[in-house]
Image (tube, rainbow, N blue to C red):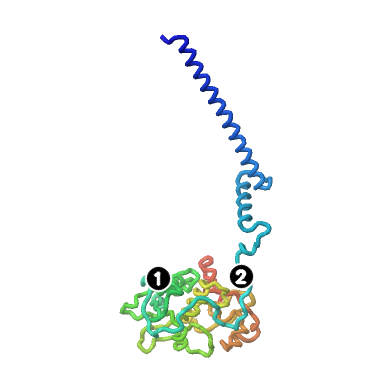
């Protein structure tokens, strides 16, 4: 049996331990309270006295961002994004500044991309199904445009878009291999500027693309050759105000349009309207500019002052209740 003296001694020790623990809990509570008050004060200062929650966090972040950028005394222009501004003054149709490209190549071509893509009703249209191959001029550096396979993929994607020539259901396209025994209807080629000038000729001394109708001396294409100027593929046209993707869609649709029978160019029908695809948008969107370049008699007359908006597609609105919307009319 525990002696009474031992019991009193043990009880005294336990009481002393409880007192020390209670004192520590009290001090901890004070520290927690002080810390909480500090956090609340800091949030209130950073939030400008506004409400708490997400707004407070957002305001604190904004305040930190302002401080990092120099605060009220800093130069706000250092953190501002670029403003497009206006394009530098250039001559009509001049090639815009941009990436580098090969000015010349070997004058020979090799197939690029993967055959097999189809667009439209390939099986049901018969003679209106155009087979095509995609080629790149030998000796051309592909680093500025992603290489020949990227060019080929763009050709396939543009022809397969519902805003393209397949929109009405009157035309279809099939990408065949350059090794096919069948002669393709179209050879879509990406060509250096010097070789393009030799192939296309023309009286306008500017970087343009073209379509060469009919088979060449070797009979290598039935309907003809679509010649896409590498300089324009890399830099585009001032008419499209830096939108290189839209320009590439336009130049492919335009030249392939020639290849499927749309030989004539078209003027801007109304000031501010979408340009007809078969307008020479590479050079200008203004009829008067194109008339001055001797681009064609169709740009003169009463509509000479009309300026259109850029447009990359024969049917930019696609199908509407089963009918294509044709801006060429």
Local crowd at mark 1 within 10 Å, few (<14), some, or many (≥20)? some
Pick whichever, 311 or 83, lies toward us.
Answer: 83
Q: How many marks?
A: 2
Whether residue 70 is visible, yes or no, is: yes
Q: Is residue 314 visible?
A: no
Of callouts 2 and 1, the N-terminal one: 2
Marks 2 and 1, how far apart in space? Answer: 38 Å
Counting from the top left corner in percent of width and height, residue 222 is at 38, 83
Image quarter hosting the N terminus: top left
**Considering the numbered disc 2 on the image, is that residue within a helix, a strand or a loop?**
loop
Q: Which residue is mark 2?
A: 84
- In percent of width and height, residue 181 lies at 31, 79
Residue 124 vs residue 101, the one in the foreground: 101
Q: Residue at x 52, y 22 (%)?
A: 18
121 and 73: which is toward the camera:
73
**Measured from the top left, where is residue 286 in percent x and y?**
61, 81
Q: Is residue 277 above or below residue 21?
A: below
Which of pointers 2 and 1 indicates the residue nearer the eye? 2
What's the mark number on residue 118? 1
Q: Is residue 66 above or below residue 264?
A: above
Tell me the SS state at disc 1. Answer: strand
């Amino acid at each position: 049996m525990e002696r009474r003296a031992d019991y009193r001694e043990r009880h005294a020790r336990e009481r002393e331990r409880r007192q020390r623990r209670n004192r520590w809990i009290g001090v901890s509570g004070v520290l927690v309270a002080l810390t909480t008050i500090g956090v609340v004060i800091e949030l209130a200062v950073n939030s400008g006295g506004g409400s708490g929650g997400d707004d407070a966090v957002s305001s604190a972040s904004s305040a930190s961002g302002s401080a990092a950028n120099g605060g009220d005394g800093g130069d706000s222009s250092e953190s501002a994004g670029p403003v497009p501004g206006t394009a530098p003054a250039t001559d009509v149709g001049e090639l815009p500044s941009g990436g580098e490209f090969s000015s010349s190549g070997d004058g020979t071509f090799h197939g690029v991309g993967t055959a097999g893509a189809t667009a439209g009703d390939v099986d049901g249209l018969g003679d209106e199904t155009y087979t095509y191959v995609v080629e790149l001029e030998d000796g051309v550096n592909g680093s500025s445009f992603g290489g020949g396979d990227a060019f080929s993929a763009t050709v396939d994607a543009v022809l397969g878009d519902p805003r393209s020539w397949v929109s009405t259901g009157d035309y279809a396209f099939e990408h065949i291999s350059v090794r096919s025994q069948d002669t393709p209807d179209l050879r879509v080629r990406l060509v250096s500027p010097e070789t393009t000038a030799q192939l296309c000729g023309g009286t306008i001394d500017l970087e343009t693309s073209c379509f060469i109708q009919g088979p060449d001396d070797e009979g290598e294409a039935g309907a003809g050759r679509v010649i896409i100027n590498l300089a324009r593929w890399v830099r585009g046209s001032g008419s499209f105000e830096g939108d290189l993707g839209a320009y590439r869609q336009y130049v492919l649709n335009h030249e392939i349009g020639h290849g499927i029978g749309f030989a004539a160019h078209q003027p801007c029908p109304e000031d501010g309207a979408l340009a007809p695809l078969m307008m020479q948008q590479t050079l200008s969107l203004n009829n008067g500019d194109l008339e001055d370049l001797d681009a064609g008699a169709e740009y003169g007359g009463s509509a000479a002052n009309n300026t259109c908006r850029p447009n990359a597609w024969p049917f930019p609105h696609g199908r509407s209740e089963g009918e294509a919307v044709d801006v060429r009319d």
